Amino acid sequence: MTGQPETAAPDAPAIELVGISKAFGPVQANKDISLKVRRGTIHGIVGENGAGKSTLMSILYGFYTADRGEIRIGGVPTKIQNSDDAIRAGIGMVHQHFMLVQPFTVLENVVLGAEEGRLLKPSLARARKLLTDLAREYELEVDPDAVVGDLAVGFQQRVEILKALYRQADILILDEPTGVLTPSEADHLFRILEGLKAQGKTIILITHKLREIMAVTDTVSVMRRGEMTATVQTADTSPAQLAELMVGRRVLLRVEKTPAVPGETVMQVRGLKVTDGHGVERLKGIDLDLRAGEVLGIAGVAGNGQSQLLEVLAGIAPASGGSVSFKGQPLDLSRTADPKYRRRLGIAHVPEDRHRLGLIMPFAEWENNCFGYHDRPRYQARWGLMDRNAMRDDARERIEKYDIRPPSCDLKAANFSGGNQQKIVIAREIENDPDVLLIGQPTRGVDIGAIEFIHNQIVAMRDRGKAILLVSVELDEILGLSDRILVMFDGAISGERLSRETDEGELGLLMAGIDPKRAST
């Protein structure tokens, strides 16, 4: 049958998947997966990037059709061949990359595709009242007349949840919901999920962050290489056990490194200012010194100038004032600044947004592997042509070294999972042996095993005498990797600390513009 089961057994699981399998050509994404999700619970699904989590949920939501297996909703076999079937069955999904029309208002986005009748005005009026009631009931307050493109990411996510609730979803799937949220926004989301659970909703949470699993779920299932390897009660497990189940080996959940031995200052920033196109000052006189052999962490809530700092230093955005020098040589901060020149000097950049600035998604992995460095002598052939064999050889070598999956240099970047896309970018920048690495959100959307690997690569660079400027909204990452920490608030430096002499509490105050050391004097 199709649609919402009308004879659902009251004691049956909200969702039951039986023997689900799905292949894409030679790649077996899901292998004979069975899963039960109890009503009114938050059920976590964890696994490495490429483990098959998103494919499984895409089958449940009707984006893909399983090759074999059965879906039961409330104990009743239910055919879900498209998202309309899923919605009629009471299933809603909040995707990792939001499915919103940016120029539309919140109200228009919520109603889009669920209009009643030919006249839009009565539909909008009814939707406005229902939206207000839903927002109040589930603590999802958002201005219905606000343009979605003007909203912060956390509020856009609320709109996605409201869309699902407006369509009367009883089962809500969230795919990596905190990948683009700050810690405070993530905590608010968890309160919302607890409220939804208290109202009887069933929630499936796909995430790679074990802290979130332990904090908010009742049950957790682990996937590895397309198979379901375990389902346990969250209270009966630990982050270390889950990490081992995910990866198949013991994983260090902390960064192991020796004390830094800082050398000379390789990059000096003085009075750096940035004013955006609306006349808003985003950087307000930043001073910093980056030294060889150290990781300098930049902490702060997203939107406080960290992104502008990275982009100016990388040469992809202009500054409105101040100076930057590299090994005593002044860098061009005007609109004519050239990122290519920065790379030649030995300044590499892993951008915060890998899709927008790090990769060309329709191009092959081997092409992305050499972008920005394709003019190097190693890649030059006769008569001004590029040596594709050399490019492919380097790509294959880095695929093996960085455990990029699937291990195909001919696969398009768009066909890799987010974590493996991140490895492609990091491998390209680190393997070109820069003196300075500017790296933003290095493990955003990356699984626990890959996080450990990326952290080790950053520490190894530091130990080779390289200088790393790290921007991250993950405080545990900042504390674990950094030797020195600068905190940004409202476009300025609100404090500086040694990582061994501070903690998340103190950094959190600095992120709010409060320096406890000054407040106590």
Image (tube, helix red, strand yellow):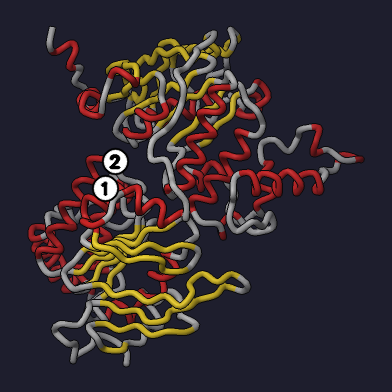
Label 2: few (<14), some or many (≥20) within 10 Å? many
Return the mark for residue 182.
2
Q: Position of residue 97 (x, y in %)?
A: 39, 56
Front position in the image: 262 or 489:
262
Q: Secondary structure at mark 1?
A: helix
Front position in the image: 201 or 384:
201
Q: Position of residue 354 (x, y in %)?
A: 51, 44
Q: CA distance from mark 1 to mark 2?
A: 8 Å
Residue at the location (12% across, 54% down)? Answer: 139
Residue at the location (33% across, 34% down)? Answer: 476
Q: Nearer the viewer, mark 1 or mark 2?
A: 2
Front position in the image: 72 or 91:
72
Q: Position of residue 245 (x, y in %)?
A: 40, 57
The answer to whether 90 is drawn above or below residue 411 in the figure is: below
Return the mark for residue 154.
1
**341 left or right of 145?**
right
Q: Which corner quadrant holds the C terminus?
A: top left
Residue at the location (31% across, 16% down)? Answer: 497
Q: Secondary structure at mark 2?
A: loop
The answer to whether 454 is drawn above or below residue 124 in the figure is: above
> Within the image, what quadrant is residue 218 found in?
bottom left
Q: Which corner quadrant holds the N terminus?
A: bottom left
Q: How many marks?
A: 2
**87 left or right of 243?**
left
Q: Position of residue 33 (x, y in %)?
A: 42, 75
**Which three-letter amino acid code belongs to the residue tagged 2?**
Thr
Front position in the image: 12 or 491:
12
The answer to whether residue 67 is seen in the rendering is yes
Q: Are marks 1 and 2 in contact (CB under 8 Å)?
A: yes
**Which three-letter amino acid code belongs to the residue tagged 1?**
Gly
